[in-house]
Image (cartoon, rainbow, N blue to C red):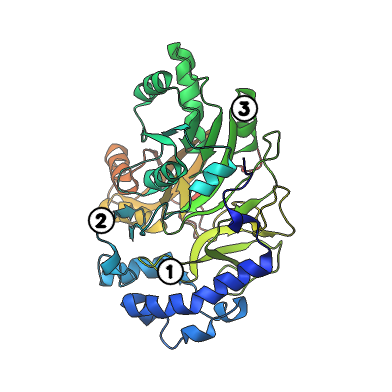
Amino acid sequence: MSDHFDKLETRDAATREADLFGRLPDFLRKATAAAPGLARWLDGVDPAAVTDRAALAKLPVLRKSDLMDAQANEPPFGGFADASLLAGQRVFLSPGPLWEPQGPGLDPWQAARAFFAAGVRAGDIVHNAFSHHMTPGGFILDEGARALGCTVFPAGTGNTDMQVEAAATLRPAVYCGTPDFLKVLLDRAGEMGKDLSSFNRALVSGGALFPSLRSEYQARGVSVLQCYATAEFGVIAYESAAGDGTPNPGMLVSENLIVEIVRPGTGDPVPDGEVGEVVVTGFNPAYPLVRLGTGDLSAITPGASPCGRSNQRIVGWRGRADQRTKIKGMFVDPRQVAEIVSRHPDIARARLVVARDGERDVMALHVEPAATGAPDVDAIAATLREVTKLSGTVVAAEPGSLPNDGAVIADQRDYSK
C-alpha cells in the first residue's frame, strides 16, 4: 500500500514550481475573462508575465475586506466568480459575511489527501461533526472523505447525546470536526455508558489543537492530525505522521495551491522561517482568487518532511494578522461586533474576549454603558448569537474600564499548552 496519496506529493520542488507557474498565466487569462471583478482588481496586469514568484509578488494582495466590499457593491460574488460554472454546485454564506461558491469536480477542496495522510483509507466510516449549515466546513470534509472511498455520517454540530448514540451504533473509525468537540463526545459517552472506542483516528480543523488535548486523545487511543483549511481554498495544508502515529513537524502545503508568507500589511514575501501572513493563489475556475490574504499568521519551515512528501511546509497557525478571530471553528469579524453595538444604543463601547474553558473555546462580550443607562445584557446576548452564530456571555463593564488600545477582539487563549 502506498504511503502517499499520489505522485504529485513526492515530485521534486523544481518540477512542482514549473508546473504551477506554467499553468498560472493561462489560468489568469481565462479567469479575468470570466470574472469581471477579478479583471477589475488585476487591471493592468499582463497574465503572460506572471511566470514566477517574483512576478506574482508584484500583484496586489486581495483582502477579505476587499471581497466583502465588492460583494456588497455587486452581490452575491462581487464579480469574482464564473457564473457559468456554478450550475449543480453549492453556494455558501460564511461569517463576515462572505458568499462563496463550491468549485467543480471531485474533491474540489483537496481534503482527500489530508484524510489519507491521517491514516484514513477507503472503506473507513467517518463521523463528520463539522457544520453543514450555510458554511462549507462540513462539505469540504465530506467531499474529501467520499472521494477517498469512505462512508460518511453527516453528524453536524450540537445534539451531543444523539451523536453519541449514533456513533455507538455505527462504530465509525474516524472523527472529523473541531478539535474540542471530540472530547465532548468521548466524555459524554462515558457519562451515558456508551462505547466509542471505535474511534482510532481523527482529522480536525477549525480551531487550535492544543498539545495537551492531542496528548489526551493519544492516551484514549485516538491518533489526531490536523489540517488548515479555509472556505475559499479548502485544505491549504495538512499534517502527516511518522510510523508510530506521532505528527511530523510542520504542515504540508496542498498541491495545486501557491502559498506565500508576506509581511502583514504588505504584499512582500518574508524569508523562510519568519512569521507573516498566509497569502494563497488557487486554480479554482469557478472562484478564481489570486493572492488572497487569509489574515492568518504562519511561517515556512525549511527542509523536507520525513514522510517523503516534498511540498513546502508551514509551521501551522500562529495567530491572526488582523483581529478577525476563529472561535469554535467560525470566524468572528470586528465588523460583527460593530453591528451588535449599532443595534443597542445602551452600549458605548464593546470588546469581545476569547478564552479557553478547559479544552473549549468561550467568548464574552464586555460592554460599557452609554449615557442612556445600563445595557440589557440578555438582549445583547441574543444579538451576539444572531450576528455571530455562536453562543457567548455578555459582561457589563464599568464606564471607561475597557482598554483604549483599538482592539475590538481580544484573543486570550494560550496556544502553547
Seen from the viewer's position, the closer of residues 170 and 239 is: 170
Secondary structure under the numbered disc 1 in the rendered image: loop
Q: 369 above or below 104?
A: above
- Residue named by callout 3: 216
Secondary structure under the numbered disc 2 in the rendered image: loop
Q: 342 above or below 414?
A: below
Q: Which percent across, then down, holds residue 263?
A: 61, 69
Q: Which percent across, then down, holds residue 404?
A: 50, 57
Secondary structure under the numbered disc 3 in the rendered image: helix
Q: 372 above or below 76?
A: above
Q: In the rendered view of the protein, which quadrant contains the C terminus?
A: top right
State which mark lies toward you, 1 or 3. 1
- Residue named by callout 1: 289
Seen from the viewer's position, the closer of residues 80 and 330 is: 80
Q: Is residue 30 left or right of residue 84?
A: right
What amino acid is found at the position of numbered circle 1 in the picture? Leu
How far, Cα to Cα, is label 2 from label 1? 21 Å
Residue at (53%, 81%) from the top-left corner? Answer: 50
Q: Which is more N-terminal, label 2 or label 3?
A: 2
